[in-house]
């Protein structure tokens, strides 16, 4: 599975619809301080089902919605769409019947988040499991946040094990076991 396109609308500083085509070989984003580089990475993590507002550098999840600026008012919703090239049919079962996947997450003030995969309503958990099984996901070690390297060095063994499990592609199994134990 390859990320092919990321679209943002009303997400943090990306108030106007923004369309980012992800070509092969993209390894980094550069730009002046405050231009939105970290926001882009957070959008990617958010659409994959991140549920911790702290990971979005906010106090509550609605903080991802454009909060307004001197010249323009705040927005009432934020939406991020992630398109995935699945021509090699490597998506996890249940999502593997088309050449492309589009995951959309939208948050509306006072109404929370809603998710769609290829226009069909799904639960947050479905999206989280899709990416957990694909070894990417909101907590994937493939996305390196600012400050994350020093966090990894200082992490407790249990937290470090989670990262290795995600990289090994077994975090979906871990989550299912945890849910089974709760039942
Ligand atoms: P640096 O190089 O310093 O790491 P960066 O390119 O990573 O900068 P970001 O942290 O992605 O920059 O963007 C910060 C900008 O996003 C700030 O100007 C901040 O005001 C703006 N921003 C964050 N959340 C919102 C929001 N909800 N509404 C409007 N603007 C926001
Ligand atoms: Mg940054």
Image (tube, rainbow, N blue to C red):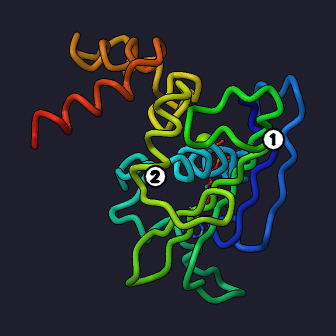
Quick check: 16 above or below 5?
Answer: below
Badge nearest the viewer, 1 or 2: 1
- Tell whether 59 sits left or right of 128: left
Q: Give whichever of 101, 160 is nearer the camera.
A: 101
Instruction: Give the residue at x 52% y 36%.
Output: 131
10 Å neighbourhood of mark 1: few (<14), some, or many (≥20)? some
The quadrant in which residue 2 appears is: top right
**What number is the disc on residue 99?**
1
Q: Quadrant of ligand 2?
A: top right
Q: Tell me: residue 150, above or below residue 180.
A: above
Q: Is residue 181 left or right of residue 11?
A: left
Ligand 1 within 8 Å, label 2 CB: no
Label 2 crowding class (10 Å Cα cut-off): few <14, some 14-19, many 20+?
many
The image position of residue 182, as x and y in percent, is 10, 41
**Which structural element holds mark 2?**
helix
Residue 178: assigned label: none
Question: Looking at the image, which residue is at 30% across and 12% down?
Answer: 161
Query: Which quadrant is home to the N terminus?
Result: top right
Q: Position of residue 34 (x, y in %)?
A: 66, 52
Q: Residue at 21% across / 16% down in the picture?
A: 158
Sooner in the amino-acid sequence: mark 1 or mark 2: 2
- Residue indicated by mark 2: 56
Tag 1 near tag 2, CB within 8 Å: no
Q: From the viewer's perspective, is residue 41 above or below residue 139?
A: below
**Disc 1 element:** loop
Image point 37% across, 56% down: which residue? 53
Name the side, left or right, on which 96 lies relative to 143. right
Question: Where does residue 54 sit, x and y in percent of width and height?
Answer: 35, 50
């Amino acid at each position: 599975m390859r990320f092919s396109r990321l679209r943002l609308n009303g997400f943090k500083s990306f108030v106007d619809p923004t369309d980012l085509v992800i070509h092969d070989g993209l390894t980094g984003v550069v730009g002046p301080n405050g231009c939105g580089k970290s926001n882009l990475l957070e959008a990617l993590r958010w659409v994959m089902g991140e549920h911790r507002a702290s990971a979005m550098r906010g106090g509550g999840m609605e903080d991802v919605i454009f909060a307004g600026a001197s010249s323009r008012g705040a927005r009432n919703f934020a939406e991020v769409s992630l398109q995935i090239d699945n021509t090699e049919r490597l998506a996890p079962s249940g999502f593997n019947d088309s050449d492309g996947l589009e995951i959309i997450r939208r948050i509306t003030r006072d109404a929370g988040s809603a998710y769609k995969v290829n226009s069909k309503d799904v639960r947050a958990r479905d999206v989280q499991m899709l990416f957990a099984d694909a070894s990417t996901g909101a907590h994937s070690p493939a996305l390196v946040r600012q400050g994350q390297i020093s966090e990894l060095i200082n992490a407790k063994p249990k937290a470090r094990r989670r990262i290795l499990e995600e990289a090994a592609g077994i975090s979906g199994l871990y989550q299912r076991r945890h849910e089974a134990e709760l039942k």
